[in-house]
Amino acid sequence: MTRFEIVNPESLGRPSGFSHGILAPPGGRVLFVAGQTAPDTCHAEADRTGAGGRLVEQFAAALDRVLAVVSAAGGRPEHIARLTVYVTDMAAYRGARGRLGDVWRAAMGRHYPAVALVEVRSLVDRDAVIEIEATAVLPPGPAGTTG
């Protein structure tokens, strides 16, 4: 099992929902996960829910897709060292933090990697309101499914 060393200098204050730094153990395999959106929910949800509900549903689906890549390489959620989350509406994100926290805990438990949250004007999928990319450090050993 990959054990990260959490690096949270007191001078930076206590983080909530993320870690300031993650130090990977020697010998780990680094997996870079491309930005994932929620293509199956983007179009279906666009007309049915408001921005906050759409963001939560797309966050859950995009995070599931990130975890699918990690799993295919032989990893688990706790192997994720870093996430970058791109949103098209920061106000909607802030308004949905409680529901997003529920989604997070269901998928990731109490594992909080280093996280960056960035508001962007748009994403490649025009109906996407969120995209998530990740870096994971997997234990030494053979890779899982590749393609």
Image: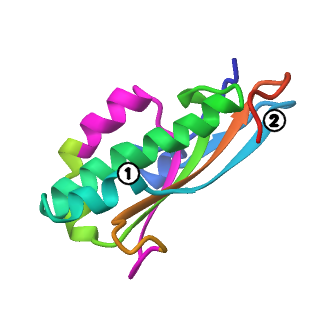
Q: Is residue 105 above or below residue 36?
A: above
Q: Is residue 17 left or right of residue 94?
A: right
Res 40 label: 1
How far, Cα to Cα, is label 1 from label 2? 30 Å
> What secondary structure is marked by label 2?
strand
Q: Position of residue 51 (x, y in %)?
A: 18, 64
Quadrant of the rendering where the N terminus is positioned: top right
Q: Is residue 47 above or below residue 11?
A: below
Q: Position of residue 117 (x, y in %)?
A: 43, 62
Residue at 35% in and 50% down? 59
Taking the view exactly as shown, the residue that stands out farthest to the bottom is 121
Magenta residue span = 100-123
Quadrant of the rendering where the C terminus is positioned: top right
Residue at 77% in and 37% down? 146
Q: Position of residue 107 (x, y in %)?
A: 40, 30
Please state which of the two labelled residues, at mark 1 or mark 2, is closer to the viewer. 1
Q: Position of residue 52 (x, y in %)?
A: 17, 59
Q: Is residue 9 magenta?
A: no
Q: Between residues 103 and 43, which one lies in front from this camera angle?
A: 43
Q: Is residue 117 left or right of residue 46?
A: right
Taking the view exactly as shown, the residue that stands out farthest to the top is 1
Res 29 label: 2
Q: Is residue 38 visible?
A: no
